Amino acid sequence: MPTVDLSTPPPPPDHLLAGLPRRLSVTLPELRLVAERSGGAPLPFLAPAPDAGRSSGLESRLGPSRGSGDDAAYAAALAGLHDPIDSLTRRGLLDQWGEPDPGLAGAVGLLATPRVAVDLDLNIGGAQLRAWHRQGRAAVATLATADGLVFELAWFATAQWPGELARVAALPAELPRRTSALPAVLDLPYELLDASGEALRAGRADVVPVLAGHHSGRVLADGTTLPDAQVPGLLGALQQESRGRLRALVADLPASPDDGTDDGTDQAPPVPDTVGVTSWLLLADGWHALRPHVDDHDGRQEGRVEVRRVEPADLATSLAPVLAEVSR
C-alpha cells in the first residue's frame, strides 16, 4: 500500500488556480441528496436527523430535558433549510436531468470510498468543529462543519493536503494569546501527567508536590532536567492554561471488493484496519503537541509524554508518522 508523505512541501503550481482546492458550502439535505444521486454513496459519519416529535416517558412527566430541547431546535433549523433540489439547481450543481456536478459527485464518492481516512475533532473555548479528510489515489476530499447543518465540502490534489490540514488547525484571529509558563518542550512520565491532572481537576493541588516527588529527576524542560521544586508549578500551569484541544484519528481503509456486479443491496462502508491518534493541546501561547513515547529507566520501560510547542503548519508533519504507520 502506498505511503502518504505529508512532510515534503508540494511543488509550486504552474499557474494561479492550479494549487487552489475547489470549495462548496452545502447544507445537510443537499449533501444527502448528492450522496443519494451519486450511487447511494454511504456517508456513515453523518448522523440521521433527530426526531423532534419523539419524547420519552420521563419527559412527558418531568418536562423536556436540555438534550431534547437541543434536538428540537436542530430539527426546526433543519426543516427551515431550502429544498435541496431547488437550491442545488439554482447554483448549477444539478443539471436538467437532476444529476449532480461531476466534481461534486466525485468528491462525495471519495468521501465514501477512501483508502486513508483522517477524522479531526477541534474544540476551542467550547466551540467545536469536526472535519473528515478522505484520501484515495491522487486526490483528497474533505468535509467540515461546526453545527451539523451547513458543511464545507472541498476536493483537491494530495499535494495540497498539508495546507488544508494547517487550515483546520489555524487559530481564530480574535483568540487572545500570551506567553506560556511552559517551556517549548516539556518531557515527563505519563503517570505523573495523568495523576497530577486528576488531582488538580479535583481541587487537590496539595497532592501534586507529593506526586512529583515520586518522579524526582524525571521531568525535562527543553532537554534539561527540571529541579523538583519547579515541577508542581509547571503541572499547575499546564492544567490552568488548557483551553482547547485538537484530536486527529487516522485509519487505513481496505479497498472495497469490486467485481463489477450489483446485487441491489447497500454496501457497508469498509472497516478500518489500523488506527492511529494524534493529539494537540491549546495553551496560552497556542498549540502544543502531545507525543507519547517509551524510555528506559532503571531497567524498565517507562511511558512518557512530550509536550512540544507547534504551529498549525506542523499538523501535517505530526500526522506523517501516523499515516506512514497505518499505510505500510
Image (tube, rainbow, N blue to C red):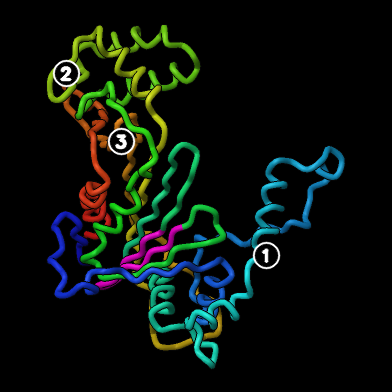
Magenta segment boundaries in residue numbering:
132-144
Outermost residue, right side: 61
Q: Which of labels 2 and 1 is toward the front?
A: 1
What amino acid type is highlighted by mark number 1?
Gly
Question: Is there CB contact under 8 Å for labels 1 and 3?
Answer: no
Crowding at label 1, few (<14), some or many (≥20) Cα neighbours within 10 Å?
few
Q: Which of labels 2 and 3 is toward the front?
A: 3
Residue designated by label 3: 286
Residue designated by label 2: 298
Task: Determine whether the residue tagged by mark 2 lies in a helix, strand or loop.
Answer: loop
Image position of 157 (left or right of 142) = left
Q: Within the image, what quadrant is residue 228 found in?
A: top left
- Secondary structure mostly taken by the magenta-highlighted segment of the chain: strand
Q: Position of residue 209 (x, y in %)?
A: 34, 8
- Residue name at image x 33 percent, y 18 percent: 235
- Residue name at image x 43 percent, y 73 percent: 108
Outermost residue, bottom side: 97
Q: Position of residue 217 (x, y in %)?
A: 19, 13
Against 216, is 13 above or below? Answer: below
Residue designated by label 1: 80
| Magenta run includes residue 227 | no
What is the distance, in whole Å, between disc 2 and disc 1 at their CAs? 64 Å
